[in-house]
Image (cartoon, grey):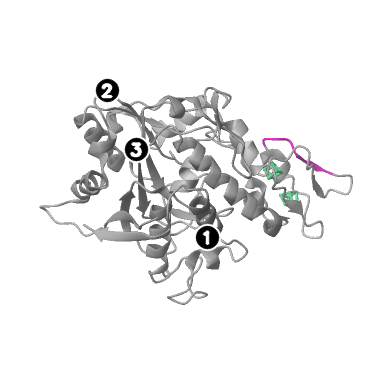
């Protein structure tokens, strides 16, 4: 497979050319015009951010893509699927409220928000892919039904996949509840009994009611109920809960890559991917906070290859100096892998390797700076 093209815009701007103009320029160069035909229903898949998180893509940038899509005759809508865990995006009503509170109101973004998998995440279509780990994928109905798909991913660290970019935004983000369970289900965190203080925070937080306090006031996770969402790991104030990383993380990443292929199966030549390599926070936008970015803001990349764009984004981040005052400053040398520094046990490259193996795209790319 030959190298794919990834277009890159840095964040330099002038009065003549601001960042909004530059954004439209790179999506045009990446081929938006070829992808959208008049009257196409166009899903713009993004993460609206958990309430309290501020690292997600700024709605003003999203509006530029909406307006450009409309100018080409497309009919855009913003979308995401509901989450597995509690929090503010677990059903369509709270999800829509959160999206609006975070700035994704029609008056700002010029397009409606439609949650992809119904009121409680049960609305999906089945996509047969017969890959090694996923035979049938369960994808949010509205995303499957759209004529074209534009992924807008906030590129950042991620506690299960090392980094989160296009593959995470599509593979996990477009999956309905059943599909998310299917990807997470081999992960089950474990409580370190010695560390557990019995505060009960994890018990209250776990949406699956998988955690209980035993008679000795130590938490216990029922593997039969746990879906491996990983939330309790960050919730525990004493660091007493750990995922059993080594056994399950590679499988999780491979499933996510296979799901991405399922999401794109009926979007041949109808998908375009954009990564915002800005506010590169250490963890997912699903948390109700975001820590300081690990590197300075880098820019925006766009491509029609979901693998090449993620590889290019990792490389762009790893070329940066660690940001002063971030959680990795002091412990990381300039050339070190920033994502391995964040999560030493996680080999983020697995998702890219596997994605390449199943024919989703290539890790070889040519970066064209605009
Ligand atoms: S026990 Fe932890 S990982 Fe399992 S479902 Fe509950 S919060 Fe998620
Ligand atoms: S949050 Fe941590 S310390 Fe508190 S009960 Fe759960 S495991 Fe124990």
Residue 269: numbered disc = 3
Question: With 18 as the anchor, is 288 left or right in this view?
Answer: right
Where is residue 63? Give x, y as percent: 27, 36
Q: Position of residue 101 (x, y in %)?
A: 41, 34
Q: Does residue 26 appear in this view?
A: yes
How many angstroms separate mark 3 from mark 1 (CA)? 25 Å
Label disc, if present, on residue 39 of the rendered structure: 2
The reply to whether callout 3 and callout 1 are in contact (CB within 8 Å) is no
Disc 2 element: loop
> Magenta stretch?
207-213
Residue found 36% across the figure and 27% down from its top: 147
Establish whether ligand 1 lies closer than 8 Å to the Cβ of label 2.
no
Q: Quadrant of the N terminus?
A: bottom left
Dot 3 falls on a residue whose secondary structure is loop
Question: Can residue 243 be seen in the rendering of this structure?
Answer: no
Q: Is residue 211 magenta?
A: yes
Instruction: Looking at the image, tell me whether mark 1 or mark 2 is earlier in sequence order.
Output: 2
Vertical order, 126 against 184 (above or below): above
Q: Magenta segment: does it hold 7?
A: no
Mark 3 or mark 2, which is nearer the start of the sequence?
A: 2
Q: Is residue 13 above or below residue 181?
A: below
User: Front-most of 109 and 26?
Assistant: 26
Is there a contact, CB below 8 Å, between mark 2 and mark 3?
Answer: no
Residue at 81% in and 46% down:
220
Mark nearer the viewer, 2 or 3:
3
Q: In this figure, which residue is indicated by the disc labeled 1?
A: 349
Q: Secondary structure at mark 1?
A: helix
Q: Earlier in the sequence, mark 3 or mark 1?
A: 3
Tell me whether the residue at label 1 lies in contact with that at label 2, contact meaning CB atoms closer than 8 angstroms.
no
The answer for how far apart the CA atoms under marks 1 and 2 are is 38 Å
């Amino acid at each position: 497979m030959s190298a794919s093209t990834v277009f890159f815009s840095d964040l330099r701007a002038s009065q003549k050319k601001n960042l909004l103009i530059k954004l439209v320029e790179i999506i045009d160069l990446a081929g938006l015009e070829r992808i959208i035909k008049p009257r196409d229903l166009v899903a713009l898949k993004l993460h609206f951010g958990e309430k309290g998180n501020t690292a997600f893509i700024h709605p003003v940038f999203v509006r530029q893509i909406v307006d450009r899509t409309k100018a080409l005759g497309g009919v855009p809508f913003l979308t995401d699927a509901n989450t597995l865990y509690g929090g503010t995006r677990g059903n369509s009503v709270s999800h829509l409220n959160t999206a609006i509170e975070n700035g994704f109101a029609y008056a700002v973004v010029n397009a409606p928000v439609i949650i992809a998998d119904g009121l409680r995440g049960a609305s999906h279509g089945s996509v047969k892919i017969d890959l090694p780990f996923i035979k049938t994928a369960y994808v949010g109905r509205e995303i499957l039904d759209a004529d074209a798909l534009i992924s807008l991913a906030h590129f950042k660290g991620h506690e299960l996949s090392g980094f989160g970019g296009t593959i995470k935004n599509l593979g996990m983000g477009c999956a309905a509840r059943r599909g998310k369970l299917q990807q997470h289900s081999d992960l089950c965190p474990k409580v370190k009994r010695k560390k557990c203080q019995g505060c009960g925070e994890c018990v209250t937080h776990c949406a699956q009611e998988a955690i209980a306090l035993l008679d000795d006031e130590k938490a216990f996770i029922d593997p039969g109920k746990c879906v491996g969402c990983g939330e309790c790991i960050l919730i525990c104030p004493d660091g007493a809960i750990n995922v059993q990383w080594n056994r399950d993380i590679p499988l999780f990443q491979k499933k996510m890559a296979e799901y991405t292929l399922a999401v794109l199966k009926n979007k041949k030549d109808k998908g375009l991917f954009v990564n915002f390599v800005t506010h590169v926070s250490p963890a997912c936008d699903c948390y109700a906070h975001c820590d300081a970015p690990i590197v300075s803001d880098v820019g925006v990349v766009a491509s029609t290859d979901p693998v090449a764009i993620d590889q290019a984004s990792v490389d762009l981040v790893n070329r940066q100096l660690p940001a002063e005052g971030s959680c990795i400053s002091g412990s990381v040398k300039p050339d070190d892998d920033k994502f391995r520094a964040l999560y030493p046990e996680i080999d983020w490259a697995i998702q890219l390797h596997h994605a390449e193996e199943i024919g989703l795209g290539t890790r070889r790319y040519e970066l064209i700076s605009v």
